[in-house]
């Protein structure tokens, strides 16, 4: 895979103007753009189409989680849009995940990658205990990952610290998409971060980078610097 295709920039903004400006600026420097709940709630499908018109593939990070019938309907609606990747919560269970995979097949969009989020990285063992499901985070992530991959889902969104474990358990096939990337230490809300080189070496397929690009003085230059690092990492 060319290094550029590995780099996904997260456009976490409710502003159409800002998203379109970044999409133009980053064209050719990243492999895809991620639009999430913030953008989708503010700008809807028309906003997604407008960003897609800038030319980069889109990762629609809606983290769908509902009963199977509702999620199948949401997948059908999302696949009316020019998206390349779509996320669901593995915690929706096997029937929900299978319904999503069936909806994709019925829509005739087999090329769209369905990705599962296992356990939100904002949750820790104390949260699991409070939720009535005590246990180790790693074990729960692995079980949810297995459930998703057995239910027709193509890959997983996972934290830097989970990549090596998931690659070792599930082999080369699942697509592993990894946020929480920090080229340099940064004081923000991400606690479990890693450098792009380390995440690539651990077995990640694609890296999601938001603020280190979008908040840089020159976002395109920041993306190009990351690309150079990824290219170096791939050669090693
Ligand atoms: O700005 P930053 O690089 O932290 O952006 C990371 C992106 O990845 C954000 O869109 C965030 O919502 C998303 N994400 C994450 N951790 C997860 C799943 C998704 O940071 N476990």
Image (cartoon, rainbow, N blue to C red):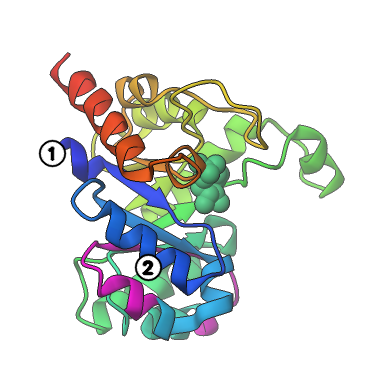
Q: Mark 2 highlights which residue?
A: 20
- Disc ID at residue 2: 1
Q: Position of residue 98 (x, y in %)?
A: 41, 69
Residue occupying image coordinates x 32% and y 80%:
81
Quadrant that contains the C terminus? top left
Ligand 1 has an atom within 8 Å of the beta carbon of the residue at disc 1: no
Bounds of the magenta segment: 48-70
Residue 119: x percent and y percent? 60, 46
Mark 1 or mark 2: which is in front? 2
- Asked where in the image residue 165 lies, by quadrant, the reply is top left
Q: Is residue 228 visible?
A: yes
- Residue 14 at x, y percent in the picture: 57, 69
Secondary structure at badge 1 equals loop
**Residue 7 vs residue 213: left or right?**
left
Is residue 68 part of the magenta span, yes or no?
yes
Question: Neighbour class for label 2 at 10 Å: few (<14), some, many (≥20)?
Answer: some
**58 and 204: which is toward the camera:** 58
């Amino acid at each position: 895979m060319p290094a550029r295709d590995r780099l996904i920039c997260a456009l976490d903004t409710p502003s159409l103007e800002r998203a379109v400006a970044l999409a133009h600026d980053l064209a050719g420097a990243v492999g895809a753009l991620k639009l999430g709940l913030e953008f989708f709630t503010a700008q809807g499908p028309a906003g997604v189409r407008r960003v897609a018109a800038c030319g980069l593939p889109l990762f629609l990070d809606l983290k769908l989680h509902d009963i199977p019938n509702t999620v199948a309907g949401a997948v059908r609606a999302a696949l009316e849009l020019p998206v390349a990747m779509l996320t669901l919560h593995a915690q929706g269970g096997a029937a929900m995940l299978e319904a999503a995979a069936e909806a994709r097949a019925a829509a005739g969009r087999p090329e769209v990658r369905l990705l599962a989020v296992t356990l939100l990285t904002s949750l820790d063992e104390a949260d699991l205990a409070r939720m009535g499901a005590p246990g180790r985070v790693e074990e729960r992530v692995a079980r949810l990952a297995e459930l998703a991959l057995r239910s027709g889902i193509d890959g997983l969104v996972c934290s830097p610290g989970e990549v090596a474990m998931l690659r070792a358990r599930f082999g080369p096939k699942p697509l592993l998409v990894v946020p929480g990337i920090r080229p340099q230490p940064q004081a923000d809300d991400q606690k479990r971060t890693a450098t792009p080189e380390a995440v690539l070496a651990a077995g990640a397929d694609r890296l999601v980078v938001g603020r280190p690009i979008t908040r840089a003085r020159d976002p395109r230059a920041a993306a190009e610097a990351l690309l150079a690092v990824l290219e170096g990492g791939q050669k090693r």
